[in-house]
Image: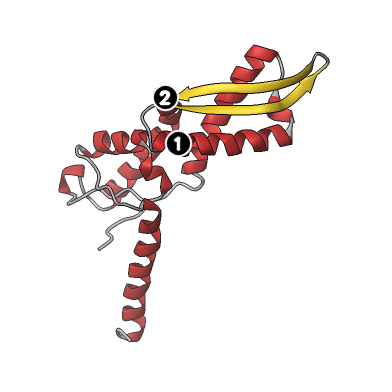
């Protein structure tokens, strides 16, 4: 049963993408002197590439290449972005978002009057549960490794279905 729940709106997979995009924009500005934050098309391409790199890094321990030809242009001609992101770099960029998840988890534990050692298991849900940085952070926060499901994206839907069944039983007597 659920003893407490807490959430932080807009804290999830896109937060990791945003951190990577910000890093890419900063690197491009340092290298070429061009600020891509004023170019909606370039930002859209960067967000798509960042999401792809995040997915690639969630299933490998190596590197993810981001190659965006003709990302922008200046008086000297077209500019391209060719960057390789290591898993370690991505994990470092994820830390500010992960720190925010700590406070949400601690709030939920306090609301339920529990300590991490009181929990039977830790279940990570959503696509970000595939990221090694998320798994490692949860293990450090709760003092043990979380359960790994084959499809963490489905855990939210399954939990909602179980909760809906519980509510239906309360309202209609189990019909």
Q: Nearer the viewer, residue 97 or 170?
A: 97
Q: Residue 99 falls in which quadrant of the image?
A: top left
User: In the image, which is nearer the foreground, mark 2 or mark 1?
Assistant: 1
Determine which of the numbered discs, if any, sits on residue 111 in the image.
Answer: none
Residue 59 lies, in percent from the top left, at 38, 38
Q: Residue at x 45, y 46 (%)?
A: 8
Q: Which corner quadrant of the image does residue 172 belong to?
A: bottom left
Residue occupying image coordinates x 28% and y 50%: 123
Counting from the top left corner in percent of width and height, residue 38 is at 74, 29
Q: Nearer the viewer, residue 26 or 53?
A: 53
Q: Is residue 166 above or below residue 59?
A: below
Residue highlighted by disc 1: 56
CA distance for labels 2 and 1 = 16 Å
> Can you tell which mark lies on residue 92?
2
- The residue shown at (40%, 37%) is 58
| 51 lies above or below 164 | above
Instruction: Tally the marks.
Output: 2
Q: With respect to residue 139, does 169 lie above or below?
A: below
Q: Secondary structure at mark 2?
A: helix
Question: In the visual, does 44 lie left or right of 87?
Answer: right
Lateral position of residue 20 relative to residue 29, left or right:
left
Task: Name the N-terminal-most of marks 2 and 1.
Answer: 1
Mark 1 crowd level (few <14, some 14–19, many ≥20, 10 Å Cα): some
Among all residues in the image, which is located at the extreme right? 75
Residue plotted at (36% across, 44% down): 129
Horizontal arrangement in the rendering, residue 78 relative to residue 167 (left or right): right
- The N terminus lies in which quarter of the figure? bottom left
Classify the position of the C terminus by image quarter: bottom left
2 and 1 marks in contact (CB < 8 Å): no
């Amino acid at each position: 049963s659920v003893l407490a729940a807490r959430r932080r709106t807009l804290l999830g997979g896109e937060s990791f993408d945003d951190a990577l995009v910000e890093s890419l924009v900063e690197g491009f500005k340092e290298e070429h002197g061009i600020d891509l934050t004023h170019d909606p098309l370039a930002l859209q391409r960067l967000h798509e590439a960042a999401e792809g790199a995040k997915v690639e890094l969630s299933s490998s321990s190596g590197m993810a290449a981001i190659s965006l030809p003709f990302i922008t242009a200046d008086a000297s001609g077209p500019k391209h972005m060719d960057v390789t992101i290591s898993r370690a770099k991505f994990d470092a960029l994820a830390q500010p978002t992960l720190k925010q998840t700590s406070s949400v988890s601690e709030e939920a534990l306090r609301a339920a009057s529990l300590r991490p050692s009181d929990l039977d298991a830790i279940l990570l849900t959503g696509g970000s549960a595939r990221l090694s940085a998320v798994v490692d952070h949860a293990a450090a926060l709760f003092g043990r490794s979380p359960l790994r499901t084959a499809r963490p994206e489905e855990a939210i839907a399954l939990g909602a279905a179980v909760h809906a069944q519980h509510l239906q039983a309360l309202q209609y007597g189990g019909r």
